[in-house]
Image (cartoon, helix red, strand yellow):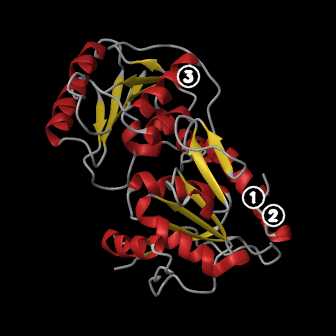
Amino acid sequence: MTAWRPILSDPPAPTAAPPLTAWILTDGKAGDVGPCIGLAEALGARTRCHVVPRERSRLAKLADLAGWPAALPDDLAPPWPDLVLACGAPAVPFARAIKRRAGRRSFVVFLRDPRPPHRGAFDMLWMPAHDGPRGPDVVVTETSPHRIAPALLARHRTRPPAWAEALPGPRVAVIVGGGPGLDALPDRLERLLPEAGSFMMTPSRRTDPALAARIAAIVARRPAFVWTGEGDNPYPAMLALADAIVVTGDSHNMVSEALATGRPVLVHEPATLRDKFRRFLDGLYAQGLIRPFEGRLESYTYEALDSTKVVADEIARRLEAFRTTGRGGA
């Protein structure tokens, strides 16, 4: 089953150049969709999201490896877009198939490592600095692209939501991911209670419900807003309004989004980390961009990181070269 969802639907001004058309290709995971949408928004593209079913992806991958052209869903048909942004293993064979069929009509970008033998199949790859291959077609940034744009943060800071009005400072955003090794977080948050004016807390889809309940009970001992999944997602507003951000270190995207704010980012590390996540966090520690969360607030400054603009600008530059020469340009 396929699903298209318009992302940017405002028509351009009558005298404006036609906006880029873009397809986003993922299996629907938030961690894959978000970076793609963030780039499309930064480029001002008129965008459609396509969700590829995992079971169909497996068949397409087998066909692709055998040298047969993967069958595309009916909705992935001409007219081809100017740009394809793909992320996640299930999207690989479909992104390759589009590139083969669209040729010079579509500039195809794959986010993160598509793995051999697919690395040379796309016009551009984006890789995080702690992982993946390097080469003239690879753009590398330390943090990931995302939707937490400077204009979005400024809008929430200028016009905060009603729930934020009752929260005194310092306001601490608590952004909780998932997986094993996060059991020590509630105790550290409890030690933080005397310093925190208020809390804003949101779990992710991966957060263990029992852990989320323990954290919610602790932060409720101060003025707090805890998102239960109902209503508009307050995550961007939480980041914008926080005086400090406590985030679990299991997610490259969540740490990257926190660093877009310019606010102190205190990372609660899981008990175990994969090697590439260890490299990611250690690199940020070494630059003074993040600090370990030890149950107290930290005061420091840094220049907010906007990797989304860096990657979007590089896509725009290479897309222009691609239209002229048929090559993305390094």
**How many residues crowd mark 3 within 10 Å: few (<14), some (14–19), many (20+)?**
many
| Residue that carries the numbered disc 1 in the rendered image | 316
Q: Nearer the viewer, mark 2 or mark 3?
A: 2
Up-down relation of residue 101 to residue 226 (above or below): below
Residue 288's image quarter?
top right
Q: Secondary structure at mark 3?
A: loop
**How many residues crowd mark 2 within 10 Å: few (<14), some (14–19), many (20+)?**
some
Q: Secondary structure at mark 2?
A: helix
| Residue that carries the numbered disc 2 in the rendered image | 320
Between the residue at mark 3 and the residue at mark 1, the CA separation in whole angstroms equals 28 Å
What amino acid is found at the position of numbered circle 1 in the picture?
Ala
Relative horizontal placement of residue 150, taking residue 278 as reference (left or right): right
Picture coordinates of residue 17, whole percent (x, y)? 80, 73
What amino acid is found at the position of numbered circle 3 in the picture?
Leu
Relative horizontal placement of residue 212, taking residue 147 as reference (left or right): left
The mark nearer the N terminus, 3 or 1, is 3
Between the residue at mark 2 and the residue at mark 3, the CA separation in whole angstroms equals 34 Å
| Residue that carries the numbered disc 3 in the rendered image | 289
Relative horizontal placement of residue 187, taking residue 317 as reference (left or right): left
User: In percent of the image, x 54 and y 45: which residue is there?
Assistant: 148
Q: Residue furthest left?
A: 210
User: In percent of the image, x 40 and y 38: which residue is there?
Assistant: 251
- Whether residues under marks 2 and 1 lie with C-beta atoms below 8 angstroms apart, the answer is yes
Picture coordinates of residue 123, whole percent (x, y)? 67, 62
What amino acid is found at the position of numbered circle 2 in the picture?
Glu
- Is residue 264 visible in this depiction of the protein? no
- Is residue 120 visible in this depiction of the protein? yes
User: In percent of the image, x 27 and y 54: which residue is there?
Assistant: 230
Up-down relation of residue 80 to residue 244 (above or below): below
Picture coordinates of residue 322, whole percent (x, y)? 78, 66
